[in-house]
Amino acid sequence: MSGGLKALLYILSFFIPVVGLIVGIIWMNGEDLEKKAIGKTCLIIGIVSIVLSCICWFAATAFSLVPAFMTGY
């Protein structure tokens, strides 16, 4: 598999995590060892992307609530 295709799959896995999850699950069940490795990497990148999205969402929510509690007495 070419390096460009791998890079494309990794980038898609990060920015569209569902793609990484689907490619990862499908390719990890194949026979080709190279595709298994790429599938595992796509799956990991997709999961990391989802976790980072959740962390950023919680942080943004928390920081948007902070001014409500910063009332000066």
Image: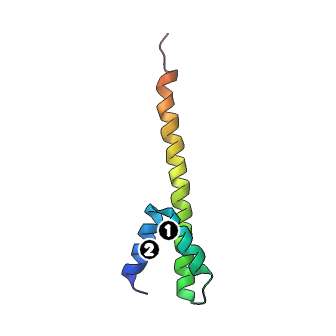
Q: How many marks?
A: 2
Relative to 66, residue 10 above or below: below
Residue at image x 55%, y 71%? 22
Judged from this view, the residue extending furthest toward the right is 29
Q: Which residue is mark 2?
A: 9
Q: Give amino acid for label 1.
A: Val
- Using the rendered view, name the quadrant where residue 44 is placed: bottom right
Residue at image x 39%, y 82%? 3
Judged from this view, the residue extending furthest toward the top is 73
Q: Which residue is mark 1?
A: 19
x and y percentages locating residue 1 in the rendered image: 43, 87
x and y percentages locating residue 45 in the rendered image: 52, 66
Secondary structure at badge 1 equals helix
- How crowded pointer 1 is (Cα within 10 Å; few <14, some 14-19, many 20+) is rated as some
Q: Give amino acid for label 2.
A: Leu
Q: Is residue 70 left or right of residue 30?
A: left
Q: Viewer-nearest of labels 2 and 1? A: 1
x and y percentages locating residue 63 in the rendered image: 48, 34
Q: Nearer the viewer, residue 51 or 25?
A: 25
Mark 2 vs mark 1, CA separation in Å: 8 Å
Relative to 68, residue 73 above or below: above
- How crowded pointer 2 is (Cα within 10 Å; few <14, some 14-19, many 20+) is rated as many
Relative to 26, residue 19 above or below: above
Q: Are dots 2 and 1 in contact, CB under 8 Å?
A: yes
Residue at image x 46%, y 62%? 16
